[in-house]
Amino acid sequence: MADASQPGNTVVAELWPREEARRLAERVAAYEPARPVIFQSGFGPSGLPHLGTMAEILRPSFVRKAFHLIEPSRTSRLIVFIDDLDGLRKVPENVPNREDVEQYLGIPVSKIPDPFGCCASFADHMIGQLGGFLAPVEVEFELVRAAEMYSSGRFDEGLKLILDKHAEIIAIIAPTLREENRAGWSPFMPICPKCGQVVERRVTAYHPERASIEFTCEKSAGGTRGCGFSGEQSVLGGMAKVQWKVDWALRWYVLKVDYELYGKDLTDSARLSGQILRVMGAKQPLGFPFEMLLDEQGHKISKSIGRGVSVEQWTRYAPIEVLKFFLLLNPRRARKLFLEAIPQYVDEYLDTVRAYAAESEEQRRESVLEFVIQGTTPRRFNSTLTFGLMMNAVAALGSSDRDFIWNYIVRYDASIAGDPETEKMGRALTECALNFYRDFVEPTKKLYTPTEVERAQLKTLDAYLRENQGASAEEIEKKIYDLGRENYDKPGKIFPLLYRSILGQERGPRLGAFIRLATPAKIVELLDDTIARTA
């Protein structure tokens, strides 16, 4: 089978959402017409969202779209569950005032002050960031917050069932724990009425008949020592939450979730949560484990460590549709996602857009782009230019002048301005290339200071270009070689000087063609700046 991650393999790449949608259609075939199909994803607001978060929300939305193509009359919901009652276990490296936040380890993130100082709580800030994070993509979802689900009583039915079945649940989970953690493990984590911490140890008695437990505040979810409080407390009304794997089963049970994807690192958790759900008398949702997104070192991107690419960074250097395209392709394969890899993904996307424009309406309905394109997405890119070439052009020109760069690109390939769709895409890519240049290339460029002998050579070329504004690329190239023969034992030895002087780099494009496209007038400006530079 062809690799679905390669450009042009649109049919292979799009099959997984359709295959999953067909499985889902079989699962819900017996549902009452009024019952919605529930898709779920989750977000832990203990850290800032990153592109892994985007993957967890967009991927089920792809399946949801495919499902509605099969079952257009069925209603559905995509729930993004926010675990804001979770105790803070670690302070993320990318939040301010980390020392101040450390005092709140073990406290529910919905009750911790916002370290950024702009929202009601730590959780509220992260949830607000999630909303802004998802704003550029066209995806419909609902936020459901754990703190509200627990405190409002919506989870009470499930909590009573877990309390009643606690021994069976312990029998499922305890064998999977390290020996030192087995003794005293409980499905329940009461919230201590004295110190407010989510208590991970230790529950000493269960009272299903009055929906309560007895516990001692010995150790919090953040690993800190408890305050020592002991007593009996209800598990209802937000006075306790349940451990992670149990909590996942509780969501599935109460929300009647039909479909949820999850990262490969949660495979065992999903299996155990499914076993707990069966004890509760329900059926596990459909889904599959997807592979991790990795950084440039091959490490899993992480919100707790602050590792990964933000959506603000992505949209600064590439269209948002490219991200959707990337996340759609072969989720069962681990892929690296870091800034320097973005040009490759943009060029894969452009290849697919070119193929899409040439397809029939029927073929387009089967294209991977049907899951990617948004209301304002260009559906055609007639230019053969690659994003990599555009980025090289910006770096070679050594300018952040938008109009100058665009005019150079149009002279290089006039088809990029040949129709509105192609031009819209071309201008967007030009802006992204300029941003990349401004952020990563321009700050590292070294201005070259020529020697007196070199300055004389540059003046000769400068004078030639002033007097021959209409010279062809071949004529300019010939002049450069003539100048090289006059000053070096080999004519090619002049090129490093010109690259340093014009582009601020050691190598570059064929200079005759480059100067012609950039215009002799612009190169004269660059040469004048270098000639005027003295040590």
Image (tube, rainbow, N blue to C red):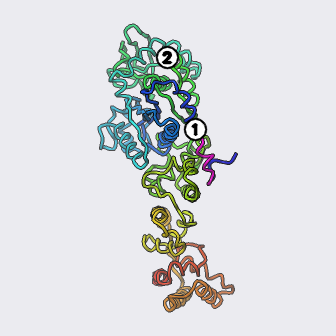
Q: Is residue 338 left or right of residue 481?
A: left
324 or 465, nearer to the observer:
324
Residue linked to disc 1: 290
How many residues crowd around disc 1 within 10 Å: few (fewer than 14), some, or many (20 or more)? many
- Observer-nearest of 430 and 436: 430
* Vertical side of 337 occupied by 442: above or below: below
The secondary structure that most of the magenta stretch takes on is: helix
Q: Position of residue 333 (x, y in %)?
A: 62, 43
Under mark 1, the amino acid is Phe
Labelled pair 1, 2 in contact (Cβ < 8 Å): no
Q: What mark, if any, has residue 280 been given in the picture?
A: 2
Count of numbered tags: 2
**Secondary structure of residue under mark 1:** strand
Instruction: Find residue 107 and report its horizontal and vertical position in percent.
Output: 37, 29
Could you tell me residue 53's position as x and y percent? 47, 41
- Which residues fall within the magenta stretch? 7-15
- Residue 406, numbered circle: none
Left or right position of 143 against 485: left
**Disc 1 from disc 2: Cα separation:** 26 Å
Magenta stretch: includes residue 374: no
Who is closer to the viewer here, 195 or 405? 405
Q: Residue furthest top?
A: 209
- Amino acid type, mark 2: Met
Q: Is residue 203 visible?
A: yes
Q: Earlier in the sequence, mark 1 or mark 2?
A: 2
**Residue lying furthest right:** 1
* Residue for point 50% across, 92% down: 467
87 vs 291, left or right, is: left
Q: Is 47 above or below relative to 255?
A: below
Q: Residue at x 46, y 30 (%)?
A: 37
Q: Is residue 8 magenta?
A: yes
Q: Secondary structure at mark 2?
A: loop
